[in-house]
Amino acid sequence: MSRLTGVNGDQMIELEQSGIGQDDVWKFNKRLKDCGLNSVDAFLKKNPTFGKVAKMRIAQELSAAEFSAARGVGRDETWIQYLFSRFMDGDSLDAFRGNQCAFVTLNYDRCLEFELTRMLSNAYGAPWKDAATSVGTIKTIHLHGSIGGLPEMEELYGMTFGPGEVAKAAQGILTLGEAGSEKEYEAARVCLGSAEVIFCLGFGFHDEIIENLGLRNGSPVVPVHGTCQGLTQSEVNRVTQQFRPRSFTELHRDGVTWNHKPRAPGPAADYLRANVELLN
């Protein structure tokens, strides 16, 4: 949340051009910084009047993050790359289009689509537009909306949003509990209900999200595997108790333990490697 409370000069100009005054921005910054809550969603549930400025700030920060990602800043081998190398890399674009993998994400950004399109385009020497079309055939559900689709050319990804683009991107964002994401949650429940294997990567296991996805008690039938984000062992135990006995087979907590058994620490890509037999 701290990133949202640090507004630079250009960002302030964009906010003002979108009809948001400096006083509103400073009030939002102060209230969010000192609210004692652990997420912007929790803050906005109690302070819905700050919805516009919060979404604008999220769009601004995601624009900056995409700018860095497009230039490889901090890029390392990711779980997306690992999945691509394991079973998303067919002999042709046609083979890729037949992939049965689906993604359900809480992120607003387009990094998943960008990374897959970038890798597919470079792996086959395919035009960006053709690679993007192939990636578009994989079901990707943004539960709370997104800041938009991929641009028509790779060079346009990561270009800093202008004021009008920030406002448009902000309109595509839905915060937790806000009306408008019912169709996405329903589509996600269908995906989870028909899945052969489910991985939750970097998930916080928020009670309301678990409930909306139909993951609590009795569903899904297939085992769930995953990593959690920032949970203690006690919180991990609480999460696993919410699922059908033995349906949540393994939870990797911050590279320390996986289901109470010591394993080598590592990010989500390492977790997938340790469960490679489930990807076949």
Image (tube, rainbow, N blue to C red):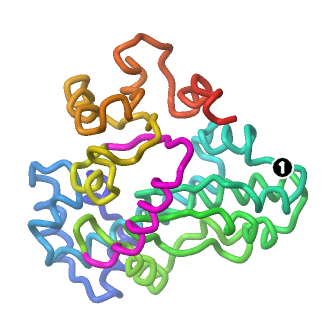
Q: Residue at x 56, y 44 (%)?
A: 196
Q: Residue at x 76, y 52 (%)?
A: 119
Q: Is residue 59 visible?
A: no
Q: Residue at x 20, y 32 (%)?
A: 238
Q: Is residue 212 left or right of residue 120?
A: left
- Span highlighted in magenta in the image: 179-204
Amino acid beneath label 1: Gly
From the viewer's side, name the closer residue of 114 and 207. Answer: 207
Residue 116: % across, % down: 69, 55
Q: Is residue 183 magenta?
A: yes
Q: Is residue 158 visible?
A: yes
Residue 107: % across, % down: 43, 58
From the viewer's side, name the closer residue of 268 and 221. Answer: 221
Q: Is residue 113 left or right of residue 133?
A: left
From the viewer's side, name the closer residue of 6 and 32. Answer: 32
From the viewer's side, name the closer residue of 255 and 155. Answer: 255
At label 1, counting other C-alpha atoms closer than 10 Å, the crowd grade (few under 14, some 14-19, many 20 or more) is some
Q: Residue at x 14, y 78 (%)?
A: 49
Residue 117: % across, % down: 72, 60
Q: Is residue 71 magenta?
A: no
Up-down relation of residue 171 to residue 270 (above or below): below
**Numbered disc 1: secondary structure:** loop
